[in-house]
Image (spheres, grey):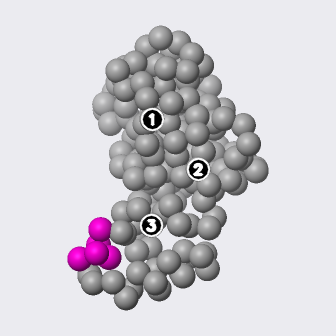
């Protein structure tokens, strides 16, 4: 944990347990290593904000749909994501196991985020859909979606990316 995050936890420990449990779900806002990224689709109908590090760890998948979409994404827990506008302009495509929810703008067709099969409790965010000014660096890790089950075993951390924050509380 970062020192700023630890200070917040220390201060909250003096609160009654009922109050503390209410605050745990929003503590990510106080993490010193996170920034608020804002982004959206091409036409501007869909807008969102997401709290994450300015140094992004992005996955490049070569499964059939990610190859066709040229999909790169970083994963965040659902609690770190907020749809600001455009819910009515979203549509979803699923296939195969129907675990992944490929959400995109029905006006311009851009997928700025989706629910990945690997992390159904999170969102895969397209870094190229973020507004400029909050990203410091991007590290790309290849994920072999053609051999999905084997890749999930090889990438031990990917499945927990949507719950990593909650497990530290």
Q: Which residue is painted at 76% across and 50% down in the image?
A: 136
Relative image position of residue 91 (x, y in whole percent): 37, 20
The residue that label 1 is drawn on is: 84
Q: Considering depth in this image, is 167 or 2 the residue closer to the camera?
A: 2
Q: Is residue 98 left or right of residue 44?
A: left
Q: Which residue is painted at 54% across and 82% down in the image?
A: 7
Secondary structure beneath disc 1?
A: strand
**Image quarter (top left, top right, bottom left or bottom right) of the C terminus:** bottom left
Residues in magenta?
Answer: 18-22
In space, the residues marked 2 and 1 are separated at their CA atoms by 13 Å
Taking the magenta stretch, the answer to whether it contains residue 95 is no
Whether residue 154 is visible here, answered yes or no, is no
The residue that label 3 is drawn on is: 27
Q: Which residue is painted at 49% across and 20% down in the image?
A: 45
Q: Is residue 146 left or right of residue 97?
A: right
Whether residue 28 is visible here, answered yes or no, is yes
Taking the magenta stretch, the answer to whether it contains residue 19 is yes
Count neighbours of disc 2 (C-alpha within 10 A) and say few if under 14, some if 14 to 19, many if 20 or more. some
Please tell me the numbered disc located at residue 36.
2
Relative image position of residue 51 (x, y in whole percent): 54, 52
Q: Considering depth in this image, is 100 or 114 the residue closer to the camera?
A: 114
Of the two numbered discs 3 and 1 on the same chain, state the one appearing first in sequence: 3
């Amino acid at each position: 944990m970062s020192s700023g995050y630890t200070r917040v936890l220390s201060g909250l420990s003096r609160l009654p347990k009922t109050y503390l449990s209410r605050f745990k779900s929003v503590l990510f806002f106080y993490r010193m290593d996170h920034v608020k990224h804002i982004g959206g689709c091409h036409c501007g109908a869909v807008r969102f904000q997401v709290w994450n590090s300015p140094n992004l760890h992005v996955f490049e998948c070569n499964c059939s749909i990610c190859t066709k979409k040229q999909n790169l994404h970083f994963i965040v827990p659902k609690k770190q994501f907020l749809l600001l506008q455009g819910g009515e302009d979203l549509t979803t495509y699923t296939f195969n196991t129907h675990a992944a929810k490929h959400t995109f703008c029905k006006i311009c067709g851009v997928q700025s985020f989706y629910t990945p099969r690997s992390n159904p409790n999170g969102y895969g965010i397209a870094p190229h859909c973020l507004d400029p000014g909050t990203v410091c660096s991007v590290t790309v890790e290849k994920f072999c979606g053609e051999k999905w089950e084997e890749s999930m075993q090889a990438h031990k951390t990917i499945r927990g990316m949507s719950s990593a924050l909650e497990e530290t509380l």
